[in-house]
Amino acid sequence: MLDVIATIEGRIGCITLNRPKALNALSLNMVRDITQVLLDWQHHDQVLAVAVRGTHKEGPFGAFCAGGDIRFFHQAATSGDPRLEDFFTEEYRLNHLIHTYPKPYIALMDGIVMGGGMGISQGASVRVVTERSKMAMPETHIGLFPDVGGGYFLSRCAGRLGEYLGLTGHLLQGEDAVHAGLADGLVNSGKLEHLWQTLIDTPFENGEAVERWVTTRFDRLDKSGLAHRAEMDAVFGLPSVGDILQKLEAESDEWSVQTAKTLRHRSPLMLHVVLEQIRRARGMGLADDLRMERDLVRHCFALRPVTNSETVEGIRALAVDKDHNPHWKPARSEDVDAAEVAAFFVSPWPVHAHPLRELC
């Protein structure tokens, strides 16, 4: 069974992620398949636009993409498998391709949309969520950072929402994703099959007509905005992780208490790295951000001993041993060494040899 089903139907290039038992988590082969299809279609006269969706165990939609295959990450890191390096280089190239794609790219983000799923959807020209969407960049939970361009798109959220989402990994429901600026519109999940079929059946004149038609399908939103936005800006705009925790732990309201509790369960080291990542990315273009993230991921997996990798330990606790008890080093944010954080932002490659040097 193919993990990526790609067909041209009418004037639409249709991509279906078809690995439902793994919630469509991306493998290296899936990244390669999607990349090749998009490269083939960008100059194909029949294809006016691309639409991408996921499947769940009962058929199309219901799950989009839960991210990269973290069990593979763990196995590859502990065994020295060079495909781990290939995965991130090729995934980030795919992210860049989607952001810069010359034709409309429509992401139907029903169900789980996390990590790598955000990477193949945030660059879409139309990002559609449903009432079932569960969107997050939860990488600090596994000792990683919000990659796949996360620094770029989180830093461009209003105010300090990007810092909040990147550090906490907070889960956004569909409508909240629209208010966060990480989706363009909400469509009831019951309408997706009809929307998909109509995209295929309609004789659109051009790609712009496809985009316009999809946006006319959006449902009215019930809320006027995200809850606790003022608190997010005030707290997550503070200079350091220490200041953020100190402010939260000085308060007694439920939002502050729960947010502090969440941060205390994340990798202390990676909280510091992520705050620096998002703030640096705010002044970067996409290509430079992806190069920075490629540097960071090499530090996470390759330049630290496996026994001292926050990422290997975080994945072990969540997905391998499943004891949900990661042994972070250091165990507390207050003990993080600023020099250790700074080292993550030193590129392992000279500019001319960077694996993403061609991106612009």
Image (cartoon, rainbow, N blue to C red):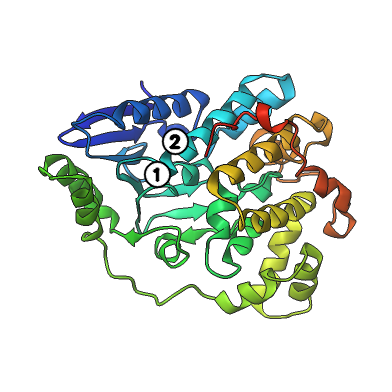
Residue drawn at (79%, 70%), measured in percent from left and top?
243
Is residue 244 depicted above or below 75 in this figure?
below
Q: From where the camera sits, is residue 348 visible?
A: yes
Q: From where the camera sits, is residue 137 visible?
A: no
Residue furthest front in the image: 352
| Quadrant holding the N terminus | top left
Q: Position of residue 46 (x, y in %)?
A: 18, 31
Q: Tag 1: Cα neighbours inside 10 Å, few (<14), some, or many (≥20)? A: many
Task: Identify the element where label 1 is drawn.
Answer: loop
The answer to whether the residues at label 1 and label 2 have Cβ atoms under 8 Å apart is yes
Q: Find the distance from the CA under tag 1 to the CA under tag 2.
A: 7 Å
Q: Position of residue 237 (x, y in %)?
A: 68, 70
Please report whichever mark, 1 or 2, sits nearer to the chain's N-terminal start.
2
* Amino acid marked by disc 1: Ala
Q: Position of residue 344 (x, y in %)?
A: 77, 43
Residue drawn at (64%, 56%), measured in percent from left and top?
278
